[in-house]
Image (cartoon, rainbow, N blue to C red):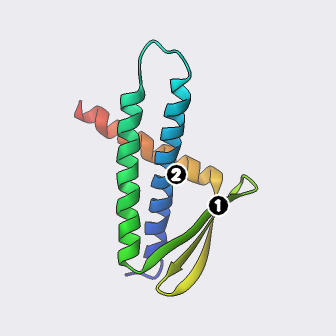
Amino acid sequence: MESDEWREILRECIVYGLLFKAVARDANTLDMVELKMTYRPILDAISVWAERRHHDYRRQFGRIGGKIRSQETRDGFLYVVLVTFRGVQHENVYNVEILRAECQDRLNNFLRTEADRA
């Protein structure tokens, strides 16, 4: 394994974790609004897909010797993740806006793929 490959696996785990939580939160918000159509099944499908990807990456991270210890947002701008990788503790700091953009990118790719299947 390349020296920083574990960081990419961790990043994907974080992005998909944030994505499935955001979609679930957005679905709950939509439930409070009266709409002409129900979008809940679509949002549920996206949430399930993102949650599966998150768990796949989390298992992969664990298999290579990693464990996520904590995750928190600081100052609304930074997302700090404390991990242990092969016995060494690491603090990974991400920009919240960049993570949000990556979530949107994964969502757009999913929607494009599903639209192509239809």
Task: Name the residue nearer the viewer: 28 or 8.
Answer: 28
Question: What residue appears at the point 49 percent right and 15 percent down from the top-left corner?
Answer: 35
> From mark 2 to mark 1, how far is it between C-alphas?
11 Å
Whether residue 116 is situated above or below residue 81 in the rendered picture:
above
Residue 44, how many percent across, how many down? 39, 36
Residue extending furthest toward the top: 36
Please give the residue where the numbered disc 1 appears in the rendered image. Answer: 72
Question: What residue appears at the point 37 percent right and 81 percent down from the top-left corner?
Answer: 1
Whether residue 9 is situated above or below residue 78 in the rendered picture:
below
Please give the residue where the numbered disc 2 appears in the rendered image. Answer: 18
Residue 34, how many percent across, how many down? 52, 15
Q: Amino acid at mark 2?
A: Leu
Marks 2 & 1, CB-CB < 8 Å contact: no
Q: SS of the residue at dot 2?
A: helix
Q: SS of the residue at dot 1?
A: strand
Residue extending furthest toward the left: 117
- On screen, residue 50 versus residue 30, left or right, reads left
Q: Residues within 10 Å of mark 2 (few under 14, many from 20)?
A: some
Whether residue 32 is situated above or below residue 98 in the rendered picture:
above
Location of residue 112 (image quadrant): top left
> Dividing the image into 4 quarters, which one contains the C terminus?
top left
Task: Name the residue nearer the viewer: 112 or 40.
Answer: 40
Q: Amino acid at mark 1?
A: Glu
Task: Name the residue nearer the viewer: 42 or 116.
Answer: 42
- On screen, residue 110 versus residue 69, left or right, reads left
Location of residue 2 (image quadrant): bottom left
Residue 90, how many percent across, how many down? 59, 79
- Residue 16, labelled with which disc? none
Question: What residue appears at the point 52 percent right and 51 percent down from the top-left corner?
Answer: 18
- On screen, residue 37 versus residue 26, left or right, reads left
Question: What residue appears at the point 45 percent right and 61 percent down from the top-left corner?
Answer: 13
Residue extending furthest toward the bottom: 87
